[in-house]
Image (cartoon, helix red, strand yellow):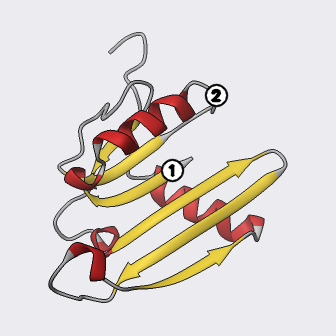
Amino acid sequence: MLSAFQTAERFTGPTQRRYTELAKQAAFVGALGAGMEKMPAPGVRGAILRPDDPLLDEWSVAILAPHFAGALVARDIGDTGAQEKRRFAFALTYERELVIQACISLMQRIAPEPGPHG
């Protein structure tokens, strides 16, 4: 499971707790965003998005499992004002090949863990 949150501030306490629980059962859980820590919650791998990364305009969740594939990708359309009034253009897919491509795109931004030799 990989998710992009735009910024680390949007990876809130309740979301951190949910992702910690998911990480106990999933093979891999990742969270990406500007200012995200390398381990933003127990068992969750983080990745910092650079200021020029196109993912800064997106919220996404991609899940890839042996018998399930799904992705929700939402692009911020630039509303200003109250957070709860923001709008997004979105796509939802269960097409395995598209989900794999989304996962690859997200996973490439997560640094590998150091091996036993550094």
Q: Where does residue 85 sit, x and y in percent of width and height? A: 28, 82
- Give the quarter of the figure containing the C terminus: top left
At a point 37% along the width and 22% down the height, the residue shown is 114
* Residue 111 visible here: no
Q: Residue furthest top?
A: 116
The residue where tag 2 is placed is 25
At a point 47% along the width and 65% down the height, the residue shown is 60
Q: Where does residue 95 sit, x and y in percent of width and height? A: 76, 71
- Examine the image and state in which quarter residue 91 appears: bottom right
At a point 39% along the width and 47% down the height, the residue shown is 31
Task: Identify the amino acid type marked 1.
Answer: Leu
Q: Residues within 10 Å of mark 1 (few under 14, many from 20)?
A: many
Foreground: disc 2 or disc 1: 2
At a point 46% along the width and 30% down the height, the residue shown is 20
The residue where tag 1 is placed is 2
Q: Is residue 67 left or right of residue 77?
A: right
Q: Is residue 102 above or below residue 11?
A: below
